Image (cartoon, rainbow, N blue to C red):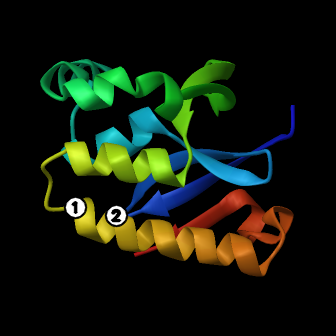
Amino acid sequence: MDSENKIAIFRGQEIRRTLYKNEWWFAIVDIVKVLTNSVQPDGYIKDMRRRDPELSKGWGQIATPLKIHTQGGLQDLNCANTEGILRIIQSVPSPKAEPLKRWLVKVLNLFCHCEPSAIGGGVAIFA
């Protein structure tokens, strides 16, 4: 698997991401946690999919299990590429949605201008 794990920081919160097929994929649970401040982002994701039938119907095309470093070691987490993350952000009513979209553009622009291994030792921090 073409995979390299990195962490990006949005407003002090970690968002895990991995390089897969030369594209950044972000841990969906981290994106939802940042948007909602939920202590149970997995539960929020289930509720979100119930409330948004179109999102639920297309979930198989949005979420891809990829190996991500966790406290318990390397595990498969549902991740989404930029298009999928933007679709998820659209489904979450949050005042952080627009700032998170702008942050995502910054992270992706940084990736376009340098190799992933050159990104601050694996951590990219954006306000």
Q: Is residue 71 visible?
A: no
User: Measuring 74% from the left and 69% from the top, which residue is drawn there?
Assistant: 119
Mark 2 element type = helix
Q: Is residue 26 above or below residue 40?
A: below
Under mark 1, the amino acid is: Lys
Q: Are marks 1 and 2 in contact (CB under 8 Å)?
A: yes
- Furthest-bottom residue in view? 113
The residue lying toward the viewer, choosing from 58 and 91, is 58
Crowdedness near tag 2: few (<14), some (14–19) or many (≥20) residues, C-alpha within 10 Å: many
Residue 99 image offset from top left, x and y in percent: 29, 70
User: Measuring 39% from the left and 60% from the top, which residue is drawn there?
Assistant: 12
Residue 23 image offset from top left, x and y in percent: 71, 53
The residue lying toward the viewer, choosing from 124 and 26, is 26
Name the side, left or right, on which 39 lies relative to 4.
left
Crowdedness near tag 1: few (<14), some (14–19) or many (≥20) residues, C-alpha within 10 Å: some
Residue marked by disc 2: 100
State the image quarter where residue 123 is shown: bottom right
Under mark 2, the amino acid is: Leu
User: Measuring 84% from the left and 63% from the top, which residue is drawn there?
Assistant: 117
User: Measuring 40% from the left and 27% from the top, which residue is drawn there?
Assistant: 58
Distance (Cα) linking label 1 and label 2: 6 Å
Residue marked by disc 1: 96
Quarter of the image where the N terminus is located? top right
Q: Is residue 84 above or below residue 105?
A: above
Mark 1 element type = loop
